[in-house]
Amino acid sequence: MDWFKYLIIPAVVSYFGIILYRRVAISRDIVANPNFRNLHASPLPVGGGIVFSFVFVFSLFFIWWLNQISDDLFWVLGVGGCVAALFGFLDDLKDIRASRKLAVHLLLSGWALFWLGGGPLLSIGWIPVLVAIPVTSLFLVWMVNAYNFMDGIDGMAVSGAVFVSGAITLVMLLTNSKSEFIIVPVLLLTTTSTFMVFNWPPASIFMGDSGSVFLGYIFGSLILVTAMSGDISIWTWLIVFGYYFADTTVTQLMRIILVKKWYLPHRSHAYQNLARITGSHLKVTGGVVLYNVVWILPLTIWSVMKPEMALFAVALAIAPSLVFAFKYGPLLSSS
């Protein structure tokens, strides 16, 4: 694949860009101070996600300029991703109100759906337009926020991005996919891997909303794009995101039931509780990475090689994560 030669430059630019940004952030006091959510004892530079986000966007622009990807894909992921990263970075700087964040997230979902022709649900004849479009839009908004929820300890969110993008790249290679979409997970794998060098426990920089909002939007849009094209089934996505979908969904549902002001910032995700109990971000993040590689990745490959077993593979992937999230999530925080 000819475009593999374009990946060395994004990796190098990301690496040195993060080093430069970290110095600037420290000098300009763009830092996250210790609080009840971030579980840190000292201030650290925040907003580092703007580096890998912009490297991804400019790399995608270059590939689009060379006519290697379609206009629609660039407008959805390139332009939409740029807006998501910039808005996230503004939030890192100014802490934007929740209502305004939601409004921008809805606008981003509308932008994606415009270029995607309304999304994959519209192709299902029995689902009305007035249901399909709002549901798809809410899915994208959920993805943006869910990814933000997973950025609560060192390395958790970025290692998830590395794993998911790597697993999806592997799936497309195993199926001999000739789709233009494969460049997206490959670019994500390259740019986020360099950031993980700096964010792995103990972290020296945080991605902030500039990274988490960007990743949530890109992954959410990529799920819709590949579902519409038939390149990757929704079952495959459910498997590779198994732990993250389970943790975020269970945590939010349980908070709605248990907590009066469930919408306020919190630190009751299972991985956050375990980080406090063990006193180690490394053990928790490393444990999730190990779980993904040893359990989720084989299930992903199995579901692709044996499509008739995909639904069973989804159940095997999500069930342990649901139990884990239920046992160590909000119930543990409230006890």
Image (spheres, grey):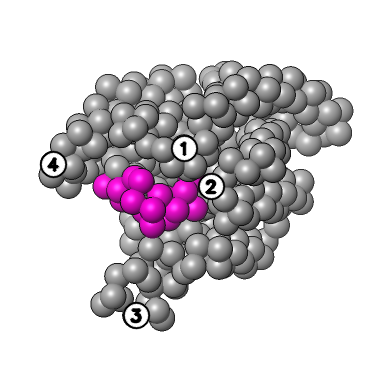
What amino acid is found at the position of numbered circle 1 in the picture?
Answer: Ile
Residue at position x 43%, y 25% in the image = 285
In primary-sequence order, the first of circles 4 and 2 is 2
Q: On the image, numbered disc 1 is attached to which residue?
A: 182
- Nearer to me, 118 or 6: 6
> Do the residues under discs 2 and 3 have CB atoms within 8 angstroms?
no
What amino acid is found at the position of numbered circle 4 in the picture?
Answer: Met
Q: Residues within 10 Å of mark 4 (few under 14, many from 20)?
A: some
Assign a secondary structure to mark 1.
Answer: helix
> Do the residues under discs 4 and 1 have CB atoms within 8 angstroms?
no
Residue at position x 34%, y 80% in the image = 128
The answer to which quarter of the image holds residue 269 is: top left
Side of 68 where 318 appears, left or right: left
What amino acid is found at the position of numbered circle 3 in the picture?
Answer: Pro
Please, is residue 17 above or below residue 55 in the view? above
Q: On the image, numbered disc 2 is attached to which residue?
A: 218
> Do the residues under discs 3 and 4 have CB atoms within 8 angstroms?
no
In primary-sequence order, the first of circles 1 and 3 is 3
The spot of residue 73 in percent (x, y) is 56, 51
Residue at position x 61%, y 54% in the image = 71
| Number of numbered tags placed on the structure image | 4
Q: On the image, numbered disc 3 is attached to which residue?
A: 128
In primary-sequence order, the first of circles 2 and 3 is 3
Please, is residue 24 above or below residue 264 in the view? above
Q: Which residues are magenta?
A: 218-235
Q: On the image, numbered disc 4 is attached to which residue?
A: 309
